[in-house]
């Protein structure tokens, strides 16, 4: 995937995770950061479970799942 697609995927995944976890986004840069970190976490978790997602949609689902996990853990740490 090209760098621009990584940024777009990160922005969409971060926005979606923000909507799922607290009902809002984090701004463009925040969404990109959360989405890209979520992609790494999601890829790691999917690898542990023996799951594999390919293509743009699979990468997006993986990033959203990872971003939700990231936001959930972050909310636990904040409390």
Image (cartoon, rainbow, N blue to C red):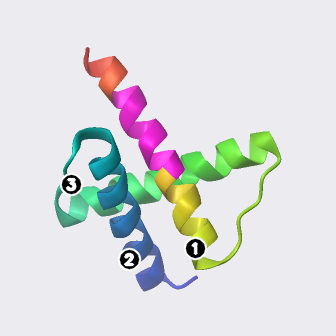
Give the image location of residue 60, x and y in percent: 52, 66
**Sequence-earlier tag: 3 or 2:** 2
**Of circles 1 and 2, which is in front?**
1
Q: In which quarter of the image is residue 57?
A: bottom right
> Relative to 68, is 31 on the left or the right?
left
Q: Which quadrant, please, contains the C terminus?
A: top left
Mark 2, secondary structure of its residue: helix
**Sequence-earlier tag: 1 or 3:** 3
**Of circles 3 and 2, which is in front?**
3
Give the image location of residue 8, x and y in percent: 38, 77
The residue beneath circle 1 is: 57
For label 2, the crowd category at 10 Å Cα-Cα, with few meaning under 14, some 14 to 19 and many 20 or more, is some
Q: Quadrant of residue 70?
A: top left
Mark 1, secondary structure of its residue: helix
Q: Which residue is drawn at 35% across and 29% down?
A: 74
The residue beneath circle 2 is: 8
| Residue found at the far right of this picture | 50
């Amino acid at each position: 995937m090209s760098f621009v697609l990584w940024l777009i995927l990160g922005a969409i995944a971060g926005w979606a995770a923000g909507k799922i976890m607290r009902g809002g986004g984090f701004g463009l840069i925040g969404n990109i950061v959360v989405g890209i970190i979520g992609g790494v976490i999601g890829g790691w978790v999917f690898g542990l479970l023996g799951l594999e997602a390919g293509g743009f949609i699979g990468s997006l689902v993986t990033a959203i799942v990872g971003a939700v996990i990231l936001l959930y853990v972050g909310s636990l740490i904040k409390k």
